[in-house]
Amino acid sequence: MAKTYVQINKFAVKDIFDAKHKSRMPGLMQKAAEKAVKASSKLTLEAPKEKGATGYSLDGSLESLAPDASGKKLVGKCSMAVTSWPGKSLKAMPSGTAATAIPGADKIDAGDVDAIADGAVASAMKSAISYMEKNAP
């Protein structure tokens, strides 16, 4: 059985607590999404060569990544849009969250930020992968 093509578009970053982390996020999030697609036996990142082929297009955004009100947790939220490819008809809107305990809002390191962004994308990709594996484009 042929695998279904998934085109992953550049991720956006809507709101992040510290701008110094913003430039790293789109690439990190793209890699997390690609990893999820590669782990699927029914999906591929390889563009189809045959004319008239269909698949899915995936757009995503880091909606927020910041310490919670108490300053004890770092929380990230990611939203995505799964559309048909090449037609761009909206099919699903998965979202995901991730959080980790932190010693304080002023003691957040880059590794924590990366882990939360990666975790939020991985969480949203669970729903996206499930949808794309079970439904034709």
Image (spheres, rainbow, N blue to C red):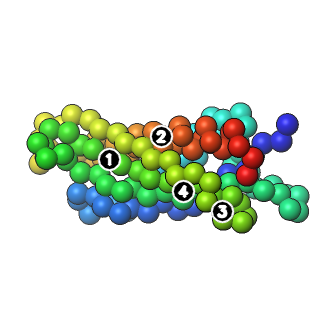
The residue lying at 54 percent from left, 46 percent from top is: 33
Secondary element type, mark 1:
strand
Check if mark 4's residue and mark 3's residue have beta carbons within 8 Å: no
User: How far apart are labels 2 and 1 at the CA level?
Assistant: 11 Å
Which mark sits nearer the N-terminus, 4 or 2?
Answer: 4
Check if mark 4's residue and mark 2's residue have beta carbons within 8 Å: no
Secondary element type, mark 4:
strand
* Amino acid tagged 4: Ala
User: How far apart are labels 3 and 1 at the CA level?
Assistant: 27 Å
User: How far apart are labels 3 and 2 at the CA level?
Assistant: 23 Å
Which mark sits nearer the N-terminus, 3 or 1?
Answer: 1
Residue at mark 4: 81
Residue at mark 3: 89
- In the picture, measured across the screen, residue 55 lies left or right of residue 63, that is right
* Amino acid tagged 2: Ala
* Amino acid tagged 1: Gly
Nearer the observer: mark 3 or 1; the answer is 3
Residue at mark 2: 122
Nearer the observer: mark 3 or 2; the answer is 3
User: How far apart are labels 4 and 2 at the CA level?
Assistant: 14 Å
Residue closer to the observer: 27 or 15: 15
Residue at mark 1: 76
Which mark sits nearer the N-terminus, 3 or 2?
Answer: 3
User: How far apart are labels 4 and 1 at the CA level?
Assistant: 17 Å
Secondary element type, mark 3:
loop
